[in-house]
Image (cartoon, helix red, strand yellow):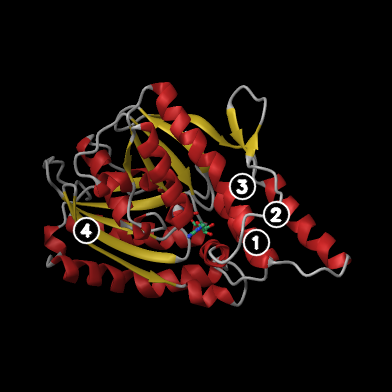
């Protein structure tokens, strides 16, 4: 009978597991200290299809999950018996992919008789900042931008946040990926748009991603994406050459500048002195530089996770697992994976 030890340690060793998309990841933390973080990615297998193929992702997770845990344990110099709790992403994401990590985590927790912690992937992205700065404490304002979400959040304490503003249609990462496709760039798109933007100029007139005159702060990426598509099609029809690097650079400005501006404004308005960020789009170098410059100019402290902890990883899942552990928030073995979980 599964009856895990509920002894709460202040500095538990937590194994984090992540398998919501195309990265199979495992990480170990002791308290807020990161001991190891490993990722086995199936991104190359999806390249020729121009996006993640769910079935291929699930099969790749099945092949990689055991190995990635072993590698993380080896890097940390630990064995299975040292693990005090297993934290795993249970949503949102691709169902078949999530089920591989979740089932593996359940088996491990059951066998080791330690608590299972079910982590919301988005809360994981938020928690990455705790590993970047051991002394970070709420309140803080977070710019969250990934393939599925774009929002400015006000974290009030370790378990509660409020949505200050969010996208009303596509996520920023989704727009980066779609623009990459329009420009003929390979999957994964975001990082390739950034690469191309480096050699371009901000000369193409595109709409900014901010919706004006709404009561709540709203972003929109669908119109911006369509404007890029129309610009390219119009040029093609007129037989004019498109300077793809200029389009990439102009899009990057239109997609990033309002996010940064509104994040800084929100922190100042709320009287919160610290800004954090999380999600794959936060790996964008231009966004990082702009956010750092604007926070500095406004006298705000910025806690920015390293790029590798912005894109999907298991260290952030372990970090959120620690918060849940310290609140005694454990999952039972009948918990199921969820394709979608609302932001709040
Ligand atoms: O957080 P993440 O790894 O997965 C989700 O939870 O969605 O975010 C993936 C998204 C993708 O849309 C990807 O294109 C975008 O983050 N991304 C980037 C960069 N690296 C990843 N977008 C812009 N610039 C980057 N360097
Ligand atoms: Zn993610």
Mark with earlier residue (1, 4) = 4
Query: Mark 3 falls on what kind of element?
Result: helix
Viewer-closest of 226 and 239: 239
Disc number at residue 254? 3
Disc number at residue 28? 4
Q: Are marks 1 and 2 in contact (CB under 8 Å)?
A: yes
Q: Are marks 1 and 3 in contact (CB under 8 Å)?
A: no
Q: Are marks 1 and 4 in contact (CB under 8 Å)?
A: no
Q: CA distance from mark 1 to mark 3?
A: 12 Å
Q: Is residue 321 left or right of residue 283?
A: left
Mark with earlier residue (1, 2) = 2
- Residue at the spot of label 2: 204
Category of crowding for the residue at label 1, using alpha-carbon neighbours closer than 10 angstroms: few (below 14), some (14–19), many (at least 20): some
The answer to whether residue 153 is above or below residue 204 is: above
Q: Are marks 3 and 2 in contact (CB under 8 Å)?
A: no
Q: Is residue 300 left or right of residue 337?
A: left
Query: Mark 1 falls on what kind of element?
Result: helix
């Amino acid at each position: 009978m599964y009856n895990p030890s509920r002894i709460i340690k202040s500095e538990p060793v937590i194994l984090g597991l992540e398998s919501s998309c195309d990265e199979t990841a495992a990480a170990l933390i002791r308290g807020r200290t990161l001991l190891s973080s490993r990722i086995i990615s199936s991104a190359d297998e999806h390249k020729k299809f121009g996006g993640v193929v769910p079935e291929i992702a699930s099969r790749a997770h099945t092949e990689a999950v055991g190995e990635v845990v072993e590698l993380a344990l080896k890097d940390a110099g630990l064995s299975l018996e040292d693990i005090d709790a297993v934290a795993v992403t249970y949503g949102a994401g691709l169902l078949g992919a999530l089920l591989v990590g979740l089932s593996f985590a359940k088996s491990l927790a059951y066998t080791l008789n330690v608590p299972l912690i079910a982590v919301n992937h988005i809360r994981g992205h938020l928690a990455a900042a705790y590993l970047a700065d051991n002394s970070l404490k709420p309140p803080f304002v977070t710019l969250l931008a990934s393939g599925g979400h774009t929002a400015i959040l006000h974290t009030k304490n370790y378990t509660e946040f409020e949505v200050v503003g969010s996208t009303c249609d596509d996520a920023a990462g989704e727009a980066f990926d779609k623009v990459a496709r329009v420009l003929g760039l390979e999957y994964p798109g975001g990082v390739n748009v950034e690469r191309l933007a480096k050699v371009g100029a901000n000369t193409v007139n595109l709409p900014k991603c901010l919706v004006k005159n709404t009561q709540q702060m709203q972003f929109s990426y669908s119109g911006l994406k369509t404007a890029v598509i129309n610009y390219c099609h119009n040029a093609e029809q007129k037989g004019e050459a498109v300077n793809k690097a200029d389009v990439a650079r102009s899009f990057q400005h239109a997609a990033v500048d309002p996010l940064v501006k509104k994040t800084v404004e929100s922190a100042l308005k709320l009287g919160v002195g610290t800004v954090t960020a999380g999600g794959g789009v936060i790996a964008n170098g231009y966004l990082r530089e702009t956010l750092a410059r604007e926070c500095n100019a406004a006298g705000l402290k910025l806690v920015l996770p390293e790029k590798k902890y912005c894109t999907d990883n298991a260290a952030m899942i372990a970090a959120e697992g620690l918060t849940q552990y310290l609140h005694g928030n454990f999952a039972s073995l009948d918990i199921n994976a969820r394709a979608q979980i609302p932001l709040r």
